[in-house]
Image (spheres, rainbow, N blue to C red):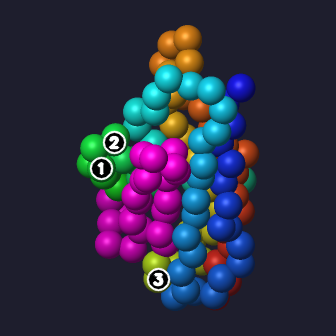
Amino acid sequence: QVQLVESGGGLVQAGGSLRLSCVVSGRFGGILTMAWYRQVPGKQRDLVASITTGGGANYADSLKGRFTISRDNVKNTVYLQMDNLKPEDTAVYYCNARILIAYWADYWGQGAQVTVSS
């Protein structure tokens, strides 16, 4: 059984920083792309950033320059460094990874609440 466990969410004032982590555990054959999404109530889940095995990163245009995604392939962990946070960044942040078990499939974490106060 594969699990994705996020940590690092919380409450921060506008202009502050948070770092999210997501660890993949269990038995699997490999991990391809890892990503972070976010969702606010009543809206769709949107891509924040993704990163390939080789470290190639892709960001939502509106977040470039404030958010940085990285990964540690040895620790099976993906990170999201969030700087200069704004109240509109308030959301539940979900970790996503494409993982090989019997076949390649997308798996999700349980979500981490990030709240930015003004």
Q: Nearer the viewer, residue 70 or 28?
A: 28
Residues at marks 1 and 3, CA–CA distance in whole angstroms = 23 Å
Q: Residue at x 50, y 59 (%)?
A: 79
Residue under label 3, please give it. Answer: 84
Report, in whole angstroms, how far the alpha carbon at label 2 lies from the one at label 1: 5 Å
Q: Are marks 2 and 3 in contact (CB under 8 Å)?
A: no
Is label 1 in contact with label 3 (beta carbons under 8 Å)?
A: no
Q: In the rendered structure, which amino acid carries the disc numbered 1? A: Gly
Amino acid, disc 3: Asn
Circles 2 and 1: CB atoms closer than 8 Å: yes
* x 66%, y 32%: residue: 26
Of the two numbered discs 1 and 3 in the rendering, the one whose residue sits closer to the viewer = 1
Does the rendering let one see residue 35?
Answer: no
Residue 6 showing in the rendered view: yes
The percent coordinates of residue 73 (x first, y second) are 42, 46
Res. 102 image quadrant: top right
Residue beneath disc 2: 52
Based on the picture, tell me whether residue 81 belongs to the magenta stretch.
yes
Range covered by the magenta-colored residues: 61-82
Mark 1 or mark 3: whose residue is earlier in sequence: 1
User: Relative to residue 27, is residue 44 depicted above or below?
Assistant: below
Q: Is residue 96 above or below residue 69?
A: above
Q: Secondary structure at mark 3?
A: loop
Badge 2: residue crowd in 10 Å (few <14, some 14–19, many ≥20): some
